[in-house]
Image (cartoon, rainbow, N blue to C red):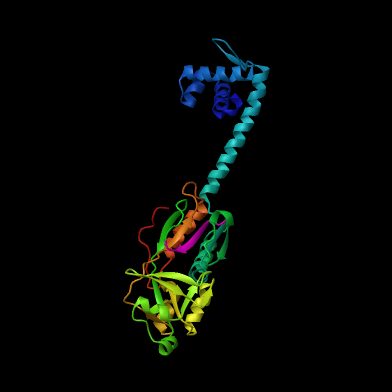
Amino acid sequence: MALNDISLLRLFVAVVESGSLSSAARAQHITLPAASRKLRQLEESLGVRLLQRTTRRQSLTEEGELLYRRAVQVLADLEQVEQQLLRKSAVVSGQLRVTTPISLGRRRIAPLLAEFCALHPELQVQIELSDSVLDLVASGMDFAVRFGGLEDSSYISRPLAPNHRVLCASPEYIRRHGEPRSPADLAHHHCLLIGQQSQADWRFEEVTVRISARLVASDGEVVHQWALDGHGIALKSIWDVADDLRSGRLRQVLAGHRIPAAPLHAIYPHKHHVAPRVRACIDYLAAHLRGPQGEAVDEPGNA
């Protein structure tokens, strides 16, 4: 139906308000024959004559008058909605929902989100702390801050900051159980795992070792505390344990055996039409997030 074509309504209103088809055609940046054809298409679709035209003047029919009044209102409403959407697209507003690992969220991300929220009075921020990998779409999250890269190609990843992982244990644990000299020695040590399973593969650059653990927690902070309390060896992000290593509360073990890095990323579901609040927040984190040694990512990535 022709009324579904907004361009036809715009042309019709332009014809009425300019007083001539040729003036309307120029205003719409189309040729006069094209304008005449479109106007004829509108009339044929509606089954009525909208304009009485002579060589000297044009006038609206009764049906044309009715359509003109309604079309002006429809186009005004559309313009108002368009302006509202454009203003909204330029303003960081609405609800922003972010998920992060528990320890990282508490220590690093939550303070930055509070600062970001303070900069934008129309914004509401909600943070979900979880060491589980949430389905962003099912959980309604705008984006996640995670260690490591993507496992799902339907998501987009933007690097935020470097991160390397270390094996660490308390001086008390090392005094009682000794220090492993090679990755293979971990089979004879008490290892602490984050997750749901009592077994995991710890990957080094030169070898992968299957770890079995008696102590397993879904919360990384629990594993961190277990390591501090001398219950075993933990594989932790440097973000979580840098202060403990500096103070001597924890000691790095197997420092000569490199573990693949797991840089910090922002993960979000859609590449196109990202809400301004999401893009602005990720930009803010990339600009302000600093690692334990003050590192930041120089290139913002592909967001």
Q: Position of residue 126 (x, y in %)?
A: 58, 62
Quadrant location of the N terminus? top right
| 159 to the left or right of 46 | left
Give residue 141's quadrant in the image: bottom right
Q: Residue at x 55, y 66 (%)?
A: 130
Q: Position of residue 223 (x, y in %)?
A: 50, 76
Q: Position of residue 140 (x, y in %)?
A: 58, 55
Q: Which sits in the foreground, 287 or 208?
A: 208
3 above or below 190?
Answer: above
Q: Does 158 appear in magenta?
A: no
Q: Which sits in the foreground, 95 or 211?
A: 211
| 175 to the left or right of 105 | left
Q: Residue at x 37, y 84 (%)?
A: 179
Q: Does 142 appear in magenta?
A: yes
5 above or below 184?
Answer: above
Q: How many marks?
A: 0
Q: Residue at x 46, y 70 (%)?
A: 200
Q: Is residue 94 visible?
A: no
Q: Position of residue 206 (x, y in %)?
A: 32, 69
Q: Is residue 228 visible?
A: yes
Q: Which residues are magenta?
A: 140-148
63 above or below 209?
Answer: above
